[in-house]
């Protein structure tokens, strides 16, 4: 799945959230799930893909990521709940 993408990870329903951007969603989420990279997601166990959005360009994906990072937490939760009300891990659906 090589395409610019913005994504949200959580450690559990209504838990800790992480907003990221990538051009290879499957690979990047695998890295989060296997704690390959040091940092926030490894420290807090944030590895459940709960939302993602595909983009035509990396520039638009980065712009959207920056915008979402500025959002209030309630807006991020609403974004997830709109398309994934059960907070399922969407990673398996990508494979």
Image (cartoon, helix red, strand yellow):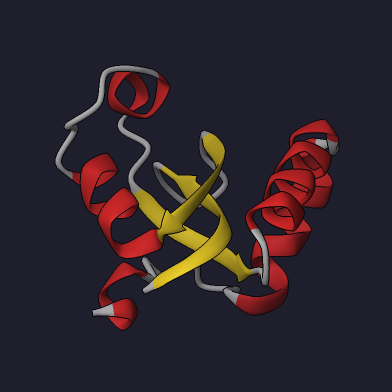
User: Compared to 32, does 61 lie above or below?
Assistant: below
Q: Residue at x 48, y 50 (%)?
A: 22
Query: Which residue sits at x=83%, y=41%?
Result: 67
Q: Is the C terminus in the top left, top right, bottom left or bottom right quadrant?
A: bottom left
Q: Position of residue 50 (x, y in %)?
A: 49, 61
Decide which of 86, 49 is in the foreground and name it. 49
Residue 33 vertical placement versus 4 (above, below) = above
Residue 68 percent coordinates (x, y): 77, 44
Question: In the displayed structure, does residue 6 sit left or right of residue 74?
Answer: left
**Residue depicted at x 77% and y 60%:** 78
Between 4 and 50, the one lying in front of the other is 4
* Residue 79 higher or lower than 48, as above or below: below
Task: Residue at 22%, 52% (x, y): give it.
Answer: 30
Q: Which of the image's four quarters has the N terminus?
A: bottom left
Left or right of 63? Residue 25 is left
37 horizontally vs 56: left or right = left
Q: Where's residue 74, x and y in %?
A: 81, 45
């Amino acid at each position: 799945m090589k395409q610019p993408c913005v994504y949200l990870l959580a450690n559990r329903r209504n838990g800790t959230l992480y907003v990221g951007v990538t051009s290879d969603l499957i690979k990047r989420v695998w890295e989060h799930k296997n704690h390959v990279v040091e940092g926030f997601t490894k420290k807090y166990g944030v590895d459940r893909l709960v939302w993602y959005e595909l983009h035509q360009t990396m520039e638009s994906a980065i712009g959207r990521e920056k915008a979402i990072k500025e959002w209030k937490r309630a807006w991020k939760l609403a974004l997830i709940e709109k398309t994934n009300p059960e907070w399922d891990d969407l990673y398996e659906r990508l494979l």
